[in-house]
Amino acid sequence: MRRTEIETSRGAFAALEALPGSGVPERCPALLVPGFTGSKEDYLAVLQSLARPGRRVVAIDMRGQYESDGPEEESAYTLGALAADIRALLEALGPEPAHLVGHSFGGLVTREAILDAGARPLSYTLMSSGPSAITGPRRRDAEALIDALPRVGIHRIWTEHMEPDARANGVPEEIIGFLRSRMLATSVTSLLTMAREILNAPDRVDELAKVCDEADLPLLVLYGENDNAWSPQIQAEMAERLGAAKVVIPGAAHSPAVEAPETTAGALCDFWRAAECRSAR
């Protein structure tokens, strides 16, 4: 696994790239998109497992996140702009179609990439994402960030709220150090704009179902049994509306790739193999 940059028609994006042990991918690649306040490192625990069967797997920082540069214009961080980035990233991975995974807010972004930017991946997974604006306790977190960030700044929010919460939850000190670096490196403009987008996203499930049916695009809805962003019930209903396969990860909450990496990687690999077999028919 290595840190790299993916050059696209819309600029460069920081990435983690994993290859199979042979170094030669024999299967279709995969692109993994993180959520709001997240980064490519959210997929760190599953990358090598996903690559092992013979594929190139790339996890990215979206524009303005952590190590991917971004401008100070709010227009760069709307769902539509970020969706265009995802299409460009898929194109940059090569001529063959790639599997696409969007976690949380990344699910809303990748959905827009398919609906409005014309992206056509080989398969599509919504991981711990929802049909529309975020709900549950994490909605209050986004609302609080929008309220506090312009007034007190990101350093104070981290020092007075995020870091104490992480320590109270038993997060190891080395992980807290990384989370601090990531949060302070992320564009404030991106945080505010993405927060507004995740709080106001419309329900486009029926549109997605129609497009994916017409394109014969395999769909998977994957989430933790204890998700506290979009509830498991909301995600199960979304899967039914989409006619999608559904996997519930035992013991996981909102970040299955972190909380249950082996189970999550196994479910993705199974889904990807089935999609490739379906495509070959």
Image (cartoon, helix red, strand yellow):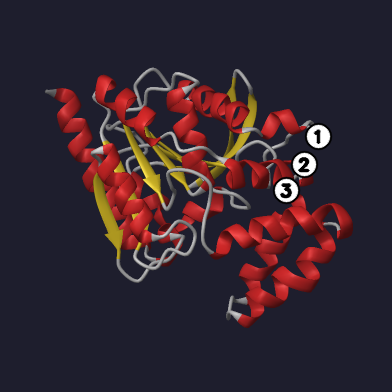
Q: x and y percent of residue 53 in the render?
A: 26, 44
In the image, residue 174 above or below residue 189: below
Q: x and y percent of residue 262 in the render?
A: 32, 61
CA distance for labels 1 and 3: 11 Å
Q: Are marks 2 and 1 in contact (CB under 8 Å)?
A: yes
Q: Earlier in the sequence, mark 1 or mark 3?
A: 1
Q: Which residue is mark 2?
A: 189
* Circle nearer the viewer, 1 or 3: 1
- Judge by depth and name the residue closer to the eye, 197 or 222: 197
- Judge by depth and name the residue closer to the eye, 234 or 175: 234
* 10 Å crowding of disc 2: few (<14), some (14-19), many (20+): many
Query: From this viewpoint, which residue is outermost toward the right?
Result: 151
The residue under the point 21% across, 47% down is 270
Q: Are marks 1 and 3 in contact (CB under 8 Å)?
A: no
Place residue 56 in its image quadrant: top left
In the image, residue 223 above or below residue 198: below
In the image, residue 13 above or below residue 47: above
Tag 3 secondary structure: loop
Tag 2 secondary structure: helix
Mark 2 is on which residue type? Answer: Thr
Instruction: Report whether residue 111 is seen.
Output: yes
Numbered label attached to residue 186: 3
The residue under the point 73% across, 48% down is 186
CA distance for labels 3 and 2: 9 Å
- Judge by depth and name the residue closer to the eye, 142 or 72: 142
Q: Earlier in the sequence, mark 2 or mark 1?
A: 1
Q: Which residue is mark 1?
A: 72
Mark 3 is on which residue type? Answer: Thr
* 10 Å crowding of disc 3: few (<14), some (14-19), many (20+): many
CA distance for labels 2 and 1: 6 Å
Instruction: Report whether residue 53 is seen.
Output: no
